[in-house]
Amino acid sequence: MPLCEVATMSLTDYQSLFSMLASAGTTLALIIGGWWSWRLFVRKRISYPRARIEHAVSHKKAFYQKTMLIVDISIANVSEVLLTLRSGKTYVRQLLPIPEDVVHAVQASSIPAKDQAHGWNLVAFQPEDWGDEPLLLEPGEAEHLFYTFFIDANVQTVAIYSYFPYVEQSGLRWFKRQPKQLGWSLTTVHDCHAPDNTAKDRHVQTA
């Protein structure tokens, strides 16, 4: 009797081995592909909404000592997921003539570095609260918010600031690393003493 026996493999055995190796390779490729897709999903924040905010601002002479300021805000969903908005705010602040409080604060160097609204007169304010019926924008959809403000005619230049906070949807929160604050804001400076129909400012921001 021979001390050892040499194992032999038939053609069928080789075919089975190659089949198992091919199956293992396909599984590994799927795992790598899934990991890469997940990495792209997280790094590029595809799971989060992105919005494009646009201001279209114009004005008209209204009645005695009043100017009608017209603000058209466009909100567009430029992401691949649903955009949900429950609230928003639009502020109109006087820049020129420079308010006396700002002049005094500048002379005294007392304006806090982070307080950009310090001393600037608030001449108009428009809040939005959609509450339990939020503004829902599917990918590619847009919504317009149209506001008309009546401000004093002596106000020459204003800054229009709009802010819309992001509301995270329920589900898979353990999977997302949600930042503490997320939202979209836009500021547009407008000259209210320019001739009618010639001062139409457009300002767009995408984030």
Image: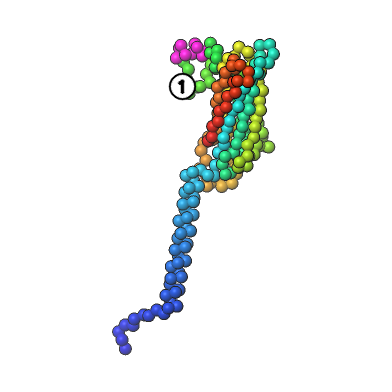
Q: Give the residue drawn at x 44%, y 14%.
A: 109
Residue type, numbered disc 1: Ala
Q: Is residue 88 above or below residue 197?
A: below
Coloring applied to the structure: rainbow
Asked whether 39 or 158 is in front, the reply is 158
Q: Position of residue 32 (x, y in %)?
A: 45, 56
The residue carrying mark 1 is 113
Residue 24 covered by magenta stretch: no
Magenta segment boundaries in residue numbering: 101-109
| Residue most extreme to the left | 3
Q: Position of residue 103 (x, y in %)?
A: 50, 12
Residue 94: in sight, yes or no? no
Q: Position of residue 69 (x, y in %)?
A: 64, 20
Q: Give the quadrant of the N terminus.
A: bottom left
Q: Position of residue 54 (x, y in %)?
A: 58, 30
Q: In which image quadrant can residue 121 be found?
A: top right
Secondary structure under badge 1?
loop
Tell me which secondary structure the magenta stretch mostly adopts.
helix
Residue 13: in sight, yes or no? yes
